[in-house]
Amino acid sequence: MRRSLVMGNWKLNGSRSDSLALANTIVAGLKEGDQGIAVCVPYVYLSDVHNAIKDTPLALGSQNIADQESGAYTGEISATMLKECGCTYALVGHSERRSYYGDTDQSVATRFCQAQKGGVTPVLCIGETLEERESDTTFAVIDKQLGAVIDMAGIDALANSVIAYEPVWAIGTGKTATDEQAQEVHKYIREQIAAKSQVVADKIQILYGGSVKPENAKAIFAMPDIDGGLIGGASLDAASFLTIYQST
Ligand code: PEP
């Protein structure tokens, strides 16, 4: 039985005081013993939020991570630095990083490896664009994005990671994949992993992301291969995010 996980992605939003208020309000809505809930916070607020949540069930993640360990890479933040700021998780290959900032399958795989090397759990984001879905290449895109990481890190490395399937056409658009569309791809991802290691396939948490809201979360999370969600817009409202978490 896999545990569920709900992660918020705050993206480029909020001030320090907004971030602390949001984190504190989420924590206030959690009970002792709750687990499987995390927020991915802008880099500059990681330490502040970490100090506020460190003895609570709410875990911390970053929204990106360097593909290098250290050195002359201006503007980058390493796994060791993120670990020091209290991060348990790091998103790697979010579609916004792939489409606006030039992340490639190779650089995403390198980030994945760097995260693990530094003791941070990578959350590998994969998913197809609308054009790719309409041209029936969804599974080929998944194969390519997932394959790059498996080739570089090895299948066993996936046991200590999380996958987020996020159809690009559903991110921030208000369009959600139907429960069946999402399940179909989640099942496919798990089957591809199972072909290499059944143990890893049974263990890995595969989250769905793309316009998840309090109204649709329960039905999505009820699907057998969906282990929780990566939540953008709705994670900026504590009540909505908590309702989504409680839908797992
Ligand atoms: C995301 O940014 O990963 C995401 C899923 O965003 P939204 O929930 O706003 O679609």
Image: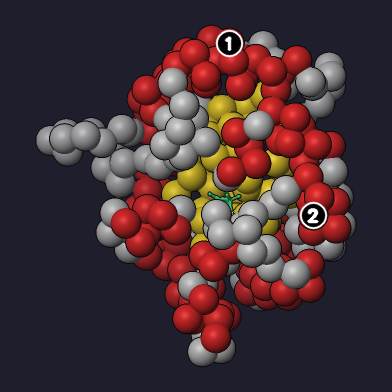
Relative to 9, does residue 133 appear above or below in the rendering? Answer: below
Q: Position of residue 227 (x, y in %)?
A: 76, 52
In the image, residue 145 above or below residue 135: above
Q: Residue at x 45, y 16 (%)?
A: 16
Name the residue rendered at 59%, 43% in the picture.
Answer: 233
Query: Could you tell me residue 213's position as x and y percent?
Result: 73, 48
Looking at the picture, tell me which residue is in the foreground, 38 or 111. Answer: 38
**Colouring scheme applied when the structure was drawn:** secondary structure
Q: Secondary structure at mark 2?
A: helix
User: Is 102 displayed left or right of 236 in the figure?
Assistant: left
- The quadrant holding residue 25 is top right
Residue type pointed to by label 1: Ala
The disc label shown at residue 52, or none: 1
Taking the view exactly as shown, the residue that stands out farthest to the front is 174
Report helix, strand or loop for mark 1.
Answer: helix
Going 31% across and 32% down the picture, which residue do you hit? Answer: 77
Rendered location of residue 243, percent (x, y): 80, 36
Residue at the image position 52 percent from the left and 19 percent from the top: 18
> In this orientation, does residue 166 appear?
no
Residue reaching furthest to the bottom: 135
- The C terminus is located in which quarter? top right
Residue 18 seen anywhere in this rendered image of the structure: yes
Q: Amino acid at mark 2?
A: Asn
Q: Residue 203: x and y, percent? A: 73, 53
Is residue 236 left or right of 4 when viewed as pictured? left
First in residue order: circle 1 vs circle 2: 1
Proximity of marks 1 and 2: CB atoms separated by less than 8 Å = no
User: Rounded to the nearest whole Å, what is the CA distance between mark 1 and mark 2?
Assistant: 30 Å
Relative to 32, residue 151 above or below: below
Q: Which residue is mark 2?
A: 216
Question: Cβ(mark 2) to ligand 1 < 8 Å?
Answer: no
